[in-house]
Image: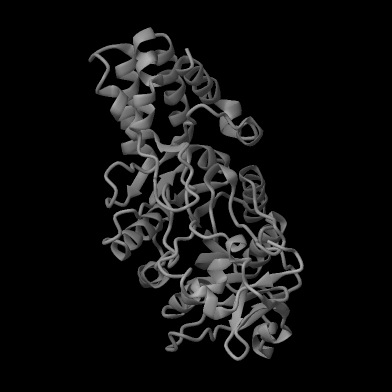
């Protein structure tokens, strides 16, 4: 994308925006357009006087839940109107005295009068209020910010810390909305060219956890490919429940009204209960989409998961025949690798499916077979607390399994790599295939 910024006219976008997936189309693919972007200050509404006073007043009484949604729509998703659509879905329910829903967003929008794409100067924080206007965002702007980079981890932290102070709650859920690339990171801002690397996301969530004084109850990614062992392990000390997709997420994203309705009706529910609600609402919304996956993961089970994974790797490596089978191209190629979307990563594969496929080839009772069954049991019964059922081979957690190219520059930054034997195991697997 050119940094002086050329963009498409709205009419030229129509064909590209049909059935868009959140990972399918980069803003750079829209660079064939010809309309000049305009920094239109009218795109940021002034905060209403009553709303502007919110941050000047003492924090409100403690609620049961604070829901924070950070929407990076500075890309094709914003142009296509998905951010506005999701905010309107939130407004079907709105905030209450027990549940505050606060959204920060930066969006590339469209100007119907000129057919140009508009650039939002800065970002806006809104307190979601219930309305009956399905196509108009009416929630008040409570904090207009000069922060323009929606791919900035520091911006993300400032948003969370500011609203944790202003809307104290017993439990906090944070949703990060944008493109996701698994181990490559999340939240691409196609104007700044910035995004959050996974280790940066981990550091950001640690800062938010410290500001909160306890683990963030739920962290969810309304973004593609993020439910990986490497990503979740980075967040294990700062989050209790992680919700995400192994697969691509449709452009429509989460069904926010169906998530908020049961929460508002019963605000005293636990973090795990809300995690299950998010997964179930997503599954019901996309029940006809045979590519949709979502899972909720319990981070307290991650240390034992790592122990069992290391034990399995050691058992496989100690058994020459088992290791040969585990490394075989046919075995690796049989693992479900989330093949949808134009930018999918075929080196992100379902771990449980790998264990299951390999286990069918191992003699019963061997150390390798027994270790594999123990790891599968832990994933299914303790680690993953809910998953959608549309993709039978997606069991809720992906892991990096490259074919013959190992991305050390990206991969070796992860805490998961420092604490596990997985990097050594996959390099040995590649060596075995090259014999």
- Image spot of residue 145 (x, y percent): 73, 73
Asked which quadrant contains residue 251, the reply is bottom left
- Image spot of residue 388 (x, y percent): 31, 52
Q: Looking at the image, is 41 positioned above or below residue 328?
A: below
Residue 96 visible in the shown view = no
- Residue drawn at point x = 42 percent, y = 24 percent: 308
- Residue drawn at point x = 36 percent, y = 70 percent: 258
Q: Quadrant of the N terminus?
A: bottom right
Camera-side residue of 389 and 346: 346
Residue 32 visible in the shown view = yes
- What kind of colouring is applied to the model shown? one colour
Q: Is residue 359 left or right of residue 348?
A: left
- Image spot of residue 165 (x, y percent): 66, 65
Q: Is residue 271 left or right of residue 191?
A: left
Q: How many numbered marks have been drawn onto this rendered protein structure?
A: 0
Q: Looking at the image, is 47 positioned above or below residue 301?
A: below
- Image spot of residue 89 (x, y percent): 43, 76
Camera-side residue of 43 and 404: 404
- Residue drawn at point x = 35 percent, y = 30 percent: 354
Q: Is residue 392 left or right of residue 236?
A: left
Q: Looking at the image, is 259 positioned above or below residue 120?
A: above
């Amino acid at each position: 994308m050119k940094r002086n910024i050329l963009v498409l006219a709205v009419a030229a976008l129509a064909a590209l925006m049909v059935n868009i997936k959140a990972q399918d189309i980069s803003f750079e693919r829209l660079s064939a357009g010809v309309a000049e972007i305009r920094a239109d200050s009218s795109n940021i509404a002034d905060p209403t006087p009553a709303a502007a006073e919110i941050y000047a007043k003492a924090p409100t009484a403690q609620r049961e839940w604070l829901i924070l949604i950070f929407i990076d729509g500075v890309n094709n998703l914003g142009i296509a109107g998905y951010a506005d659509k999701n905010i309107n879905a939130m407004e079907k329910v709105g905030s209450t005295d027990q549940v505050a829903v606060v959204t920060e967003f930066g969006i590339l929008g469209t100007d119907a009068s000129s057919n140009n794409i508009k650039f939002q100067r800065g970002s806006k924080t809104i307190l979601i209020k219930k309305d009956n206007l399905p196509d108009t965002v009416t929630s008040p702007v409570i904090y207009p910010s000069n922060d323009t980079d929606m791919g900035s981890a520091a911006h993300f932290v400032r948003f969370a810390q500011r609203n944790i102070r202003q809307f104290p709650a017993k439990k906090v859920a944070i949703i990060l909305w944008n493109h996701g690339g698994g181990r490559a990171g999340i939240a691409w801002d196609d104007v700044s060219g910035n995004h959050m690397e996974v280790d940066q996301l981990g550091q950001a969530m640690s800062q938010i956890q410290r500001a909160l004084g306890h683990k963030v109850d739920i962290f969810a990614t309304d973004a593609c490919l993020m439910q990986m062992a490497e990503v979740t392990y980075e967040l294990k000390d700062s989050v209790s429940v992680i919700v995400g997709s192994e697969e691509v997420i449709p452009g429509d994203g989460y069904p926010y009204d169906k998530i908020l309705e049961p929460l508002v009706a019963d605000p005293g529910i636990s973090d795990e209960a809300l995690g299950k609600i998010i997964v179930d609402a997503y599954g019901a919304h996309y029940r006809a989409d045979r590519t949709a996956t979502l899972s909720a993961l319990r981070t307290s089970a991650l240390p034992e998961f790592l122990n069992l994974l290391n034990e399995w790797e050691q058992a496989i490596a100690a058994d020459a025949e088992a290791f040969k089978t585990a490394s075989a191209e046919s075995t690796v190629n049989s693992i479900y690798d989330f093949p949808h979307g134009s930018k999918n990563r075929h080196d992100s594969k379902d771990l449980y499916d790998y264990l299951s496929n390999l286990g069918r080839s191992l003699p019963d009772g061997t150390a390798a077979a027994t270790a594999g069954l123990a790891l599968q049991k832990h994933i299914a019964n303790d680690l993953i607390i809910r998953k959608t059922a549309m993709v039978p081979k997606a069991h809720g957690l992906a892991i990096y399994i490259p074919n013959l190219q190992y991305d050390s520059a990206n991969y070796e930054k992860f805490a998961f790599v420092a604490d596990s034997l997985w990097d050594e195991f996959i390099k040995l697997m590649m060596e075995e295939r090259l014999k």
